[in-house]
Amino acid sequence: DRCHTLQGMVLPSRTYPGATLAARYARINDNHTQRCTLAVLPIRILGDPALRQKAKRVPSALLRAGPKIDASIHKLIEDMIDSMRAASGVGLAAPQIGVSLRVIVIGLPDEEPFALINPEIVKRSGERPVEEGCLSLPGYRAELTRSLTVLVKGLDAEGRPVRIKARDDPSTGLRAGLLAQVLEHEIDHINGI
Protein backbone atom coordinates (compact mmCIF):
# COMPACT_ATOMS: atom_id res chain seq x y z
CA ASP A 1 0.00 0.00 0.00
CA ARG A 2 1.52 3.31 -1.07
CA CYS A 3 -0.66 5.47 1.20
CA HIS A 4 0.64 6.74 4.52
CA THR A 5 -1.25 8.31 7.39
CA LEU A 6 0.92 10.92 9.04
CA GLN A 7 0.19 12.33 12.46
CA GLY A 8 0.44 16.11 11.90
CA MET A 9 4.18 16.22 12.49
CA VAL A 10 5.63 19.68 11.82
CA LEU A 11 8.83 19.80 9.82
CA PRO A 12 11.53 22.38 10.52
CA SER A 13 10.78 25.56 8.56
CA ARG A 14 14.33 25.64 7.17
CA THR A 15 13.73 22.29 5.48
CA TYR A 16 10.12 22.67 4.31
CA PRO A 17 9.40 26.42 4.30
CA GLY A 18 6.00 27.17 5.76
CA ALA A 19 4.69 23.62 5.49
CA THR A 20 3.59 21.00 7.92
CA LEU A 21 4.21 17.42 7.03
CA ALA A 22 0.48 16.82 6.99
CA ALA A 23 -0.10 19.66 4.53
CA ARG A 24 2.68 18.67 2.20
CA TYR A 25 2.77 14.87 2.21
CA ALA A 26 -0.16 13.43 4.12
CA ARG A 27 -2.85 11.33 2.53
CA ILE A 28 -6.40 11.89 3.65
CA ASN A 29 -7.51 9.62 6.48
CA ASP A 30 -11.26 9.92 6.93
CA ASN A 31 -13.02 7.49 9.29
CA HIS A 32 -10.27 4.90 8.76
CA THR A 33 -10.73 5.02 4.96
CA GLN A 34 -7.71 6.18 3.02
CA ARG A 35 -7.89 7.68 -0.43
CA CYS A 36 -4.60 7.56 -2.31
CA THR A 37 -3.47 9.21 -5.54
CA LEU A 38 -0.15 9.65 -7.29
CA ALA A 39 1.66 12.86 -6.45
CA VAL A 40 3.37 14.42 -9.43
CA LEU A 41 5.05 17.55 -8.16
CA PRO A 42 6.21 20.47 -10.29
CA ILE A 43 9.91 20.41 -11.12
CA ARG A 44 11.81 23.60 -10.39
CA ILE A 45 13.42 25.30 -13.39
CA LEU A 46 16.90 26.85 -13.58
CA GLY A 47 16.84 30.22 -11.85
CA ASP A 48 14.91 28.91 -8.84
CA PRO A 49 17.03 29.61 -5.74
CA ALA A 50 16.27 26.10 -4.35
CA LEU A 51 18.48 24.62 -7.08
CA ARG A 52 21.58 26.57 -5.99
CA GLN A 53 21.45 25.79 -2.26
CA LYS A 54 23.28 22.90 -0.70
CA ALA A 55 20.59 20.52 0.58
CA LYS A 56 20.43 19.51 4.25
CA ARG A 57 21.14 15.97 5.41
CA VAL A 58 18.04 14.02 6.32
CA PRO A 59 18.03 14.50 10.10
CA SER A 60 18.61 11.53 12.37
CA ALA A 61 15.15 12.08 13.89
CA LEU A 62 13.70 10.94 10.54
CA LEU A 63 16.12 8.01 10.39
CA ARG A 64 14.64 5.91 13.15
CA ALA A 65 16.73 3.29 14.88
CA GLY A 66 16.16 -0.23 13.76
CA PRO A 67 16.93 0.81 10.87
CA LYS A 68 13.69 2.42 9.73
CA ILE A 69 12.93 5.52 7.76
CA ASP A 70 10.15 7.89 8.80
CA ALA A 71 6.95 7.69 6.73
CA SER A 72 7.44 11.28 5.56
CA ILE A 73 10.70 10.31 3.84
CA HIS A 74 9.04 7.28 2.23
CA LYS A 75 6.28 9.58 0.96
CA LEU A 76 8.85 12.04 -0.38
CA ILE A 77 10.61 9.20 -2.23
CA GLU A 78 7.31 7.98 -3.72
CA ASP A 79 6.42 11.50 -4.84
CA MET A 80 9.86 11.94 -6.37
CA ILE A 81 9.60 8.67 -8.30
CA ASP A 82 6.11 9.63 -9.55
CA SER A 83 7.41 13.06 -10.61
CA MET A 84 10.53 11.63 -12.29
CA ARG A 85 8.48 9.10 -14.26
CA ALA A 86 5.91 11.72 -15.30
CA ALA A 87 8.74 13.87 -16.68
CA SER A 88 10.38 10.85 -18.43
CA GLY A 89 13.56 11.33 -16.43
CA VAL A 90 16.14 8.85 -15.16
CA GLY A 91 16.95 10.73 -11.97
CA LEU A 92 15.60 13.43 -9.67
CA ALA A 93 16.97 15.20 -6.60
CA ALA A 94 14.73 16.54 -3.82
CA PRO A 95 15.77 20.20 -4.43
CA GLN A 96 14.30 19.88 -7.93
CA ILE A 97 10.85 19.65 -6.35
CA GLY A 98 11.66 22.36 -3.79
CA VAL A 99 12.63 20.11 -0.86
CA SER A 100 16.05 20.95 0.56
CA LEU A 101 16.97 17.44 1.69
CA ARG A 102 19.74 15.10 0.51
CA VAL A 103 17.49 12.55 -1.20
CA ILE A 104 17.80 11.34 -4.80
CA VAL A 105 15.90 8.81 -6.88
CA ILE A 106 17.17 6.98 -9.95
CA GLY A 107 15.16 4.99 -12.46
CA LEU A 108 17.20 3.59 -15.34
CA PRO A 109 15.36 2.19 -18.38
CA ASP A 110 13.83 -1.26 -17.74
CA GLU A 111 14.89 -1.27 -14.07
CA GLU A 112 13.09 -0.63 -10.80
CA PRO A 113 13.74 2.87 -9.45
CA PHE A 114 15.63 3.25 -6.20
CA ALA A 115 16.38 6.00 -3.71
CA LEU A 116 19.48 7.11 -1.87
CA ILE A 117 19.29 9.13 1.33
CA ASN A 118 22.23 11.34 2.29
CA PRO A 119 24.34 10.10 -0.64
CA GLU A 120 27.98 11.11 -0.98
CA ILE A 121 30.55 10.45 -3.66
CA VAL A 122 33.37 8.68 -1.86
CA LYS A 123 35.65 8.28 -4.85
CA ARG A 124 35.68 9.17 -8.51
CA SER A 125 38.22 8.48 -11.22
CA GLY A 126 38.81 9.12 -14.89
CA GLU A 127 36.99 11.47 -17.21
CA ARG A 128 34.74 11.09 -20.21
CA PRO A 129 32.67 13.45 -22.32
CA VAL A 130 28.90 12.90 -22.14
CA GLU A 131 25.84 14.58 -23.56
CA GLU A 132 23.47 15.34 -20.75
CA GLY A 133 20.06 16.87 -20.16
CA CYS A 134 18.31 17.94 -16.99
CA LEU A 135 14.66 18.03 -15.95
CA SER A 136 15.30 21.53 -14.56
CA LEU A 137 16.43 22.69 -18.02
CA PRO A 138 13.70 21.26 -20.27
CA GLY A 139 14.71 20.75 -23.88
CA TYR A 140 18.36 21.66 -23.34
CA ARG A 141 21.27 19.22 -23.75
CA ALA A 142 24.97 19.93 -23.48
CA GLU A 143 28.26 18.09 -23.58
CA LEU A 144 30.18 18.04 -20.33
CA THR A 145 32.77 15.96 -18.52
CA ARG A 146 31.78 13.21 -16.10
CA SER A 147 33.80 10.62 -14.22
CA LEU A 148 34.45 7.14 -15.63
CA THR A 149 33.93 5.54 -12.21
CA VAL A 150 32.08 6.74 -9.12
CA LEU A 151 31.75 5.11 -5.72
CA VAL A 152 28.77 6.41 -3.75
CA LYS A 153 27.65 5.69 -0.20
CA GLY A 154 24.34 6.48 1.44
CA LEU A 155 21.24 4.85 2.86
CA ASP A 156 18.62 2.95 0.89
CA ALA A 157 14.88 3.59 1.32
CA GLU A 158 14.82 1.24 4.32
CA GLY A 159 17.68 3.01 6.09
CA ARG A 160 20.32 0.38 5.38
CA PRO A 161 23.83 1.58 4.48
CA VAL A 162 24.70 0.97 0.82
CA ARG A 163 27.68 1.50 -1.44
CA ILE A 164 27.28 1.67 -5.20
CA LYS A 165 30.17 1.44 -7.63
CA ALA A 166 29.26 2.50 -11.15
CA ARG A 167 31.69 2.51 -14.03
CA ASP A 168 31.61 3.45 -17.70
CA ASP A 169 33.12 0.34 -19.20
CA PRO A 170 32.10 -1.01 -22.63
CA SER A 171 32.20 -4.57 -21.26
CA THR A 172 29.58 -3.72 -18.59
CA GLY A 173 27.17 -2.12 -21.03
CA LEU A 174 25.35 1.19 -21.27
CA ARG A 175 23.51 0.99 -17.94
CA ALA A 176 26.64 1.00 -15.75
CA GLY A 177 27.93 4.11 -17.51
CA LEU A 178 24.53 5.76 -17.32
CA LEU A 179 24.29 4.94 -13.62
CA ALA A 180 27.66 6.62 -12.97
CA GLN A 181 26.51 9.68 -14.88
CA VAL A 182 23.12 9.90 -13.15
CA LEU A 183 24.61 9.42 -9.67
CA GLU A 184 27.06 12.24 -10.31
CA HIS A 185 24.36 14.49 -11.81
CA GLU A 186 21.85 14.04 -8.98
CA ILE A 187 24.49 14.44 -6.26
CA ASP A 188 25.53 17.67 -7.99
CA HIS A 189 21.92 18.86 -7.52
CA ILE A 190 21.90 18.19 -3.76
CA ASN A 191 25.23 20.01 -3.53
CA GLY A 192 23.69 23.09 -5.20
CA ILE A 193 25.74 22.69 -8.37
Image (spheres, helix red, strand yellow):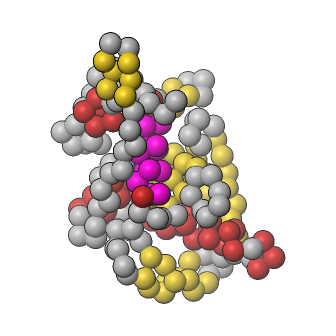
* 21 sits to left or right of 160: left
Left or right of residue 76, residue 53 in this image: left
From the image, which quarter does the C terminus lie in?
Answer: bottom left
Residue 53 lies in what quarter of the image?
bottom left
**Residue 14 x %, y %:** 25, 42
Would you place residue 72 above or below residue 166 in this image?
A: above
Compared to residue 116, the image places residue 187 above or below, namely below
Residue at 43% in and 82% down = 141
| Picture coordinates of residue 79, whole percent (x, y) | 41, 45
Where in the figure is residue 42, as x and y percent of width and height? 30, 56
Report the number of discs. Answer: 0
Q: Residue furthest left?
A: 18
Identify the residue at horizontal 43%, vertical 37% (top origin): 75
Secondary structure of the magenta portion, mostly?
Answer: helix
In the depicted structure, whether residue 59 falls above or below residue 104: above
Query: Within the magenta stretch, is there residue 84?
Result: yes
Residue 59 in view in this figure: no
Residue closest to the eye, 98 or 80: 80
Q: Please tell me which residue is depicted at 31% across the width and 26% down the height of the picture.
A: 28
Residue 148 picture quarter? bottom right
Residue 30 seen anywhere in this rendered image of the structure? yes
Q: Residue furthest top?
A: 31
132 falls in the magenta region: no
| Residues shaded magenta | 74-85
Location of residue 59 in the rendering, given as x and y in whole percent from the top left corner: 42, 36
Q: Residue 107 vs residue 171: left or right? A: left
Closer to the camera in the image, 39 or 107: 39
